[in-house]
Amino acid sequence: MKKCPKCGAENRDIAKFCSDCREPFSEDSVNLSKRKFTLFTILVFVVMLGVIIYLVVSRQTGLEKSVLVVPQIQTIAVASLGATYTPTVVFTPTEDAKKNNNSRTAKRAQKQQHHVKVIVPEIKTIEPTPEEPNPEATVFAFAPLLTKTVSGSKELSEGQEAEQAKNYRDAMVWYEQAAALGNSDAEQRIGSIYNLGMGVTKDYQKAMYWYLKAAGHGNSDALCNIGGLYQNGDGVEQNYVEAMMWFQKAADHGNADAEFNIGWLYEHGYGTLKNYQKALDWYQKSADDGNQDALKMIEQTKNEMPQ
């Protein structure tokens, strides 16, 4: 507000004439008022911009804290699989978010619940050429024979005894000690504890992490279990083609459960064309490797085959 030099009446800063006596204000006074108004507008704009930037940064930070990020495994860890991967993250809405139509509230509820739908690898097959051989794949081709139980055997045994006694907390301690020594069986068992929720909260993302780590050390059970996650859609988008790929890798190491699962996929035509003969062949391989359930499936598949 500014006072009229003639009558002393209060007037708005941008007024050109006194509201009481109609005395015109000087040009300098008017320009000063305009400058004050302009500076005030700029100040308000800067404050609002700062608030917006703060909210955006806070939201991104909150989302990063809400994501359980699977530690990145070096390419060499999965070299024996002939593949590399890049972790991806896709959020899935929580139950509260699904019930609420307000997208902003839904996203806030999603962040607070810390739910993550997928943190899994995108597999990219490496095809080495004779001119450019893959030395890592060559070195780790014998990983199943060299690293499966080289170290941590004592810790693994202690963990297995604790798990059989359903003392999962002690089992986890022993398995973690064995895994620190590079024992792939222990890594696989940790993955299964998280997968099945034995003594811990079921967590498919942690299960996937430990299965991948064990698979990188040549553990066929871990390879099979990764296929199982894709087959059932546990923590990942259900994908029978991806499941078939992992089962095949495990079957290459003579894993009876993986051979059984491949037979099941062929029998029902999931991720592949239905083929009863191939289903029988894989069930027979599984039975030959000690899976008794495969014998029952052989009889069942024969009955389902068209005459």
Image: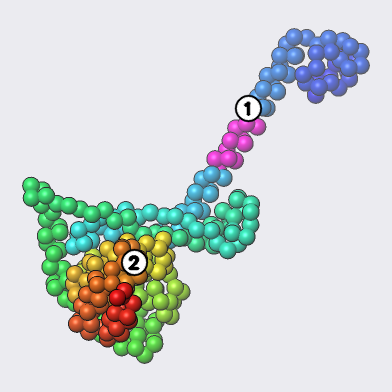
Q: What is the number of the mark on residue 42?
A: 1
Q: Quadrant of residue 273?
A: bottom left
Q: Quadrant of residue 167?
A: bottom left
In 3D space, how far apart are the residues under numbered discs 2 and 1 (Cα atoms)?
Answer: 67 Å
Residue flagged by tag 1: what amino acid is it?
Ile
Instruction: Please indicate, yes or no, whether residue 71 appears anywhere in the rendered image.
Output: no
Compared with residue 54, is residue 238 higher up or lower down, i.e. above or below?
below
Of all residues shown, which one is farthest toward the front?
307
Q: How far across and down, in percent of the image, does residue 279 sit?
A: 27, 73
Q: Nearer the viewer, residue 265 or 174?
A: 265
Magenta-span inclusion, residue 231 = no
Compared with residue 198, is residue 129 higher up or lower down, i.e. above or below?
above
Is 47 on the left-hand or right-hand side of 158? Answer: right
Q: Which residues are magenta?
A: 43-54
Is 68 on the left-hand or right-hand side of 122? Answer: right
Tally of numbered tags: 2
Residue shown at 20%/77% (left/top)?
Answer: 285
For disc 2, the marked residue is 269
Q: Nearer the viewer, residue 168 or 221?
A: 221
Q: Quadrant of residue 23?
A: top right
Q: How far across and down, in percent of the image, does residue 36 sit?
A: 69, 22
